[in-house]
Image (cartoon, helix red, strand yellow):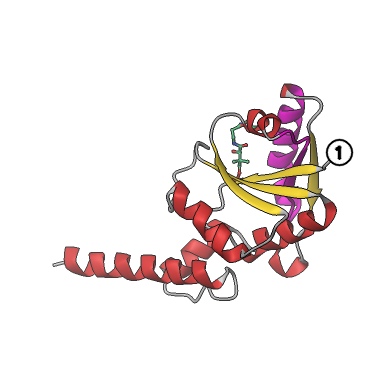
């Protein structure tokens, strides 16, 4: 039987840390589905289709990895893909509480789905999508933090915001 793992998240946008986790998961499982969330309570910077496309482009052709949007309960999506494994990345102790809560809630909902935590390379432990957006938004270079296609998008976004502010200010 094929071991299918689902790696869910907002990926707003995907970072080198996320890609590192995807690579590690792809070494462990037969197929990895990167599941891009549509309905977490968060306000997203990038629309769903763009978050999906950015990951697809960053990954290139990887036969064992798919990227799909999902909405509704994560465990329903996992079941619908005949998977039993959920992957989450753990960067630091600060991630633990929320991750522990989500893993146990998902287990309560579907006891046969197991959450597996993977650690990214330590050079990515400080990295998060929100910090990357803050850096890029304030004129910092996001080049080493995200794949090149995402870096371009972030620069375009921060350029547009500056332009807009310039027009809006007297
Ligand atoms: O990248 P994020 O924002 O930490 O990902 C969080 C995500 C999308 C995995 C989480 O919000 C989620 O699973 N959302 C789907 C709705 C759901 O199933 N909620 C109950 C899970 S405890």
Q: Which residue is mark 1?
A: 1
Q: Which residue is most to the left?
A: 170
Q: Is 119 situated above or below 2? A: below
Q: Is residue 68 left or right of residue 43?
A: right
Q: Is residue 107 magenta?
A: yes
Q: What residue is drawn where x is 77% and y is 56%? A: 26
Image quarter of residue 36: top right
Image quarter of residue 86: top right
- List x then y, in percent, for residue 61: 64, 63
Q: What residue is drawn where x is 59% and y is 75%? A: 144
Q: What residue is drawn where x is 74% and y is 45%? A: 87
- List x then y, in percent, for residue 22: 71, 57
Of 134 and 45, the residue lying toward us: 45
Q: Is residue 111 left or right of residue 129?
A: right
Of 162 and 154, the residue lying toward us: 154
Q: Is residue 41 magenta?
A: no
Q: Is 22 situated above or below 39? A: below
Q: Which residues are magenta?
A: 82-108
Q: Quadrant of ligand 1?
A: top right
- List x then y, in percent, for residue 34: 64, 49
Of 100 and 7, the residue lying toward us: 7
Neighbourhood count class around disc 1 (C-alpha, 10 Å): few under 14, some 14–19, many 20 upward: few
- In what quadrant of the picture does the C terminus appear? bottom left
Q: How many marks?
A: 1
- Find numbered disc 1 in the image and state the secondary structure of the residue it sits on: loop
- List x then y, in percent, for residue 151: 49, 70
- In what quadrant of the picture does the N terminus appear? top right
| Ligand 1 has an atom within 8 Å of the beta carbon of the residue at disc 1 | no
Q: Is residue 117 left or right of residue 79?
A: right
Q: Is 38 situated above or below 11? A: above
């Amino acid at each position: 039987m094929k071991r299918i793992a689902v790696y869910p998240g907002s990926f707003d946008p995907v970072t080198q840390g996320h890609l590192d986790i995807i690579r590690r998961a792809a070494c462990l499982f037969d197929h990895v589905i990167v599941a891009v969330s549509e309905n977490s309570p968060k306000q997203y910077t990038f629309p769903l289709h763009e978050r999906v496309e950015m990951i697809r482009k960053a990954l290139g052709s990887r036969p064992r990895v798919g990227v799909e949007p999902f909405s509704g309960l994560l465990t329903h999506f996992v079941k619908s893909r005949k998977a039993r494994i959920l992957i989450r990345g753990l960067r630091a102790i600060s991630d633990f509480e929320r991750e522990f809560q989500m893993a146990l809630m998902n287990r309560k909902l579907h006891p046969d789905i197991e959450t597996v935590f993977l650690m990214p390379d330590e050079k990515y432990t400080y990295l998060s999508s929100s910090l990357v957006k803050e850096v890029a938004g304030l004129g910092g270079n996001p080049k080493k933090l995200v794949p090149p296609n995402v870096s371009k998008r972030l620069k375009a976004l921060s350029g547009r915001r500056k332009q807009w502010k310039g027009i809006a200010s007297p």
